[in-house]
Image (cartoon, helix red, strand yellow):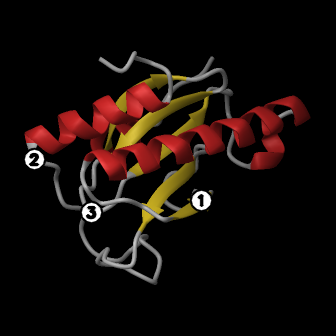
Amino acid sequence: MFDLDPAFLATSQALGDLALCHARLQADARFPWIVLIPRVEDARELEDLAPDQRRMLMDEVLAAGHAVRAIGVALDRPAPKLNVGQLGNVTPQLHVHVVGRRPADPAWPGPVWGFSAAEAYSDADLATAIAAAKVALGFERDL
């Protein structure tokens, strides 16, 4: 049975479930950022996924990249560069970060991890980011 690590609840907003992964918007307004968590019991490393699941994860990383770029456009901060990372040093449950980057972001060109404390979205920007991500991921139709 798949259980989401509670750490994700404190740092991100649910977007929905893809074929393999639960998708979440990282709660840091500085970066358009989606976290994908494969719904596979006890998965901690990529090697814990079956070969077909690893291929599916790659497809979902690409879809999340499309959604991250949509968030950037919707917030008038386009993301010409994508960073993809699977760390798990703090939260060991297998998850993949897909982060939109731009030369004007505060951590550029360094990594976003450990840069500084996350900044909360305004209510309006959070709603915009979630809507853009959901449309791009196919969870909701573009209205």
Question: Alpha carbon of mark 2 to alpha carbon of mark 3: how far?
Answer: 11 Å
- The residue sitting at 34% across, 77% down in the picture is 115
Question: For numbered disc 3, what is the local secondary structure?
Answer: loop
Question: For numbered disc 2, what is the local secondary structure?
Answer: loop
Residue neighbourhood size for the residue with mark 2, other residues' Cα within 10 Å, grouped as few (<14), some (14–19), many (≥20): few
Give the answer, above or below, for where 85 lies relative to 26: below
- The residue sitting at 50% across, 21% down in the picture is 138
Percent coordinates x, y for residue 107 in the rendering:
35, 79
Q: Amino acid at mark 1?
A: Val
Q: Which residue is mark 3?
A: 30
Q: Amino acid at mark 3?
A: Arg
Q: Quick check: can you spot residue 14?
A: yes
Residue neighbourhood size for the residue with mark 3, other residues' Cα within 10 Å, grouped as few (<14), some (14–19), many (≥20): some
**Numbered mark located on residue 54 in the image:** none
**Numbered mark located on residue 122 in the image:** 2
Percent coordinates x, y for residue 22 in the rendering:
52, 28
Question: Alpha carbon of mark 2 to alpha carbon of mark 1: how far?
Answer: 25 Å
Give the answer, above or below, for where 120 lies relative to 74: below
- The residue sitting at 29% across, 78% down in the picture is 106
Q: Amino acid at mark 2?
A: Ser
* Cβ atoms at labels 2 and 1 below 8 Å apart: no
Q: Residue furthest left?
A: 123
Sequence-wise, the earlier of marks 2 and 1 is 1
Looking at the image, residue 135 sits to the left or right of residue 81; the answer is: left
Residue neighbourhood size for the residue with mark 1, other residues' Cα within 10 Å, grouped as few (<14), some (14–19), many (≥20): some
**Numbered mark located on residue 84 in the image:** 1
Q: Nearer the viewer, residue 38 or 5?
A: 38
Q: Residue furthest bottom?
A: 109
